């Protein structure tokens, strides 16, 4: 897949809903008229989804590390007790 920087930026603006009504109409016409452009748009959508998923997985790992540090480390016992009190049934 070879795609110009201008096309990439234009597709990003489309996917971010940053185009004017007129620009959006022209963009969508181009999708119909140029199959390779439509393919590039689809591929960039997939790339964005994968990047987002990768970011979520990394964030989950980081949150897990923080949770382990705060709730398994004996030096944080006071913090642990305070948190437990916040969520304790009265």
Image: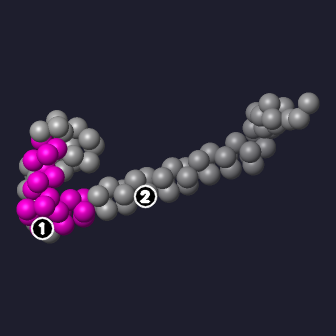
As for residue 84 lying within the magenta part, the answer is no
Q: Which quadrant: the N terminus?
A: bottom left
Left or right of 41 on screen, residue 78 = right
Residue 43 in the image: state x and y as whole percent.
24, 64
Q: What stretch is highlighted in magenta?
A: 23-44
Residue that extends furthest to the right in the rendered view of this protein: 90
The local secondary structure at tag 1 comes to helix
Q: Which quadrant: the C terminus?
A: top right
Q: Quadrant of residue 61?
A: bottom right
Identify which residue is drawn at 21% across, 46% down: 14
Identify which residue is drawn at 81% across, 35% down: 87
Q: Tell which circle, 2 or 1, labels the residue nearer the N-terminal end.
A: 1
Q: Can residue 81 be seen in this view?
A: no
Count of all numbered marks drawn on residues in the image: 2
Residue 64 in the image: state x and y as whole percent.
62, 51
Q: Is residue 54 visible?
A: yes
Residue 40 in the image: state x and y as whole percent.
18, 63
In the image, which is nearer the foreground, mark 2 or mark 1? 1
Please tell me how crowded label 1 is: few (under 14), some (14-19), or many (20+) other residues with Cα within 10 Å: few
Residue that badge 2 annotates: 54
- Cα separation between marks 2 and 1: 29 Å
As for residue 41 lying within the magenta part, the answer is yes
Identify which residue is drawn at 77% across, 34% down: 83
Residue 8 in the image: state x and y as whole percent.
15, 52
Front residue of this view, candidates 88 and 15: 15
Residue that badge 1 annotates: 35
Residue 69, which numbered label? none
The local secondary structure at tag 2 comes to helix
Front residue of this view, candidates 85 and 52: 52
Identify which residue is drawn at 16% across, 52% down: 28
Q: In which quarter of the image is residue 70?
A: top right
């Amino acid at each position: 897949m070879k795609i110009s920087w201008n096309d990439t930026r234009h597709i990003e603006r489309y996917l971010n809903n940053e185009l004017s009504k007129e620009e959006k109409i022209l963009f969508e016409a181009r999708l119909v008229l140029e199959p390779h452009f439509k393919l590039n748009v689809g591929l960039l959508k997939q790339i964005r989804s994968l990047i987002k998923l990768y970011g979520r997985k990394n964030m989950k790992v980081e949150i897990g590390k923080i949770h382990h540090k705060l709730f398994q480390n004996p030096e944080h016992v006071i913090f642990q007790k305070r948190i437990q009190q916040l969520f304790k049934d009265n």
